[in-house]
Image: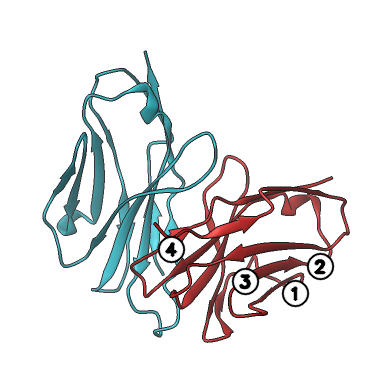
């Protein structure tokens, strides 16, 4: 069974600080996908990134970066120079790439509430 | 960019009433899903649908729930007799394989 753990329930930072959100996952599959979603107060789920299990290269997109380490089953997310608009709940999620070929359900972590104060 | 559309955005219903939540997935997607998020909690998988049948359902998805793809474009979630604990945000999603995973903006269901 797959599992995603986001140990940080809430994080509060001051604007312009860097912040890292942790994600640890468990899966028995060798092929899987990892995701990060942002959920602002309006409630929708905003896709941030998808990474497959064969690609361990770190990725940077503007102020966002992701560190994928298979050796520790972690997929951490860093926001550099945080802004008030980054305040949201952030979810890490896992999809096993093959579940009988008819289902790619996502298993979500419990989320981390990030508050960026001015 | 293609979107998954959910209606209504907010629904209030009385306990024991039936509700139907509607979704229009992205047209060339093959896999369809419903997820639920109780306020302040994580997003939980309810059911996946592929090739006109349920491919997996969670423990939450009991006999009170059903899904349909009645006309090739809509994808609905029906709750037959709502309970207070069904109050949640319900998200529809669709994907091409496991990759182009797109969520709708959700329907907030309030059972009173």
Which chain hosts label 2? B
| SS at badge 3 | loop
Q: Which residue is mark 2?
A: B80
Q: Which residue is mark 1?
A: B63
**The disc label shown at residue B74, or none:** 3
Question: Disc 1 versus disc 3: distance between alpha carbons?
Answer: 21 Å
Question: Disc 1 versus disc 2: distance between alpha carbons?
Answer: 9 Å
Look at the numbered discs 3 and 2 and tell me whether their residues touch, using CB distance below 8 Å: no
| Quarter placement of the C terminus of chain A | top left
Instruction: Place residue A112 in its image quadrant.
Output: top left
User: Dot 3 surroundings within 10 Å: few (below 14), some, or many (20 or more)?
Assistant: some
Residue at (63% x, 78% y) in the render:
B69
Mark nearer the N terminus (1 vs 3): 1
User: Dot 2 surroundings within 10 Å: few (below 14), some, or many (20 or more)?
Assistant: some
Look at the numbered discs 1 and 2 and tell me whether their residues touch, using CB distance below 8 Å: yes
Given residues A11 and B75, the one toward you in this image is: B75
User: Dot 1 surroundings within 10 Å: few (below 14), some, or many (20 or more)?
Assistant: few
Which chain hosts label 4? A
């Amino acid at each position: 069974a797959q599992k995603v753990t986001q140990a940080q329930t809430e994080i509060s930072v001051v604007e312009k600080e860097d912040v890292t959100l942790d994600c640890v996952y468990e899966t028995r599959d060798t092929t899987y996908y990892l995701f990060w979603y942002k959920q602002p107060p309006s409630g929708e789920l905003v896709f941030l990134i998808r990474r497959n299990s064969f690609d361990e290269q770190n990725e940077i997109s503007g102020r966002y970066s992701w560190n994928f380490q298979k050796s520790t089953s972690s997929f951490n997310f860093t926001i550099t120079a945080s802004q008030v608009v980054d305040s949201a709940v952030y979810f890490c999620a896992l999809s096993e790439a093959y579940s009988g070929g008819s289902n790619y359900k996502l298993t979500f972590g419990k989320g981390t509430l990030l508050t960026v104060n001015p | 960019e293609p979107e998954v559309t959910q209606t209504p955005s907010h629904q209030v219903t009385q306990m024991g009433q039936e509700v139907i939540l509607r979704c229009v997935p992205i047209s060339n997607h093959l896999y369809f899903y419903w997820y639920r998020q109780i306020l302040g909690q994580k997003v939980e998988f309810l059911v996946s649908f592929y090739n006109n049948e349920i491919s997996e359902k969670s423990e939450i998805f009991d006999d009170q729930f059903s899904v349909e793809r009645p006309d090739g474009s809509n994808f609905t979630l029906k709750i037959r007799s709502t309970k207070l604990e069904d109050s949640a945000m319900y998200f529809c999603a669709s994907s091409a394989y496991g990759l182009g995973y797109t969520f709708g903006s959700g329907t907030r269901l309030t059972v009173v």
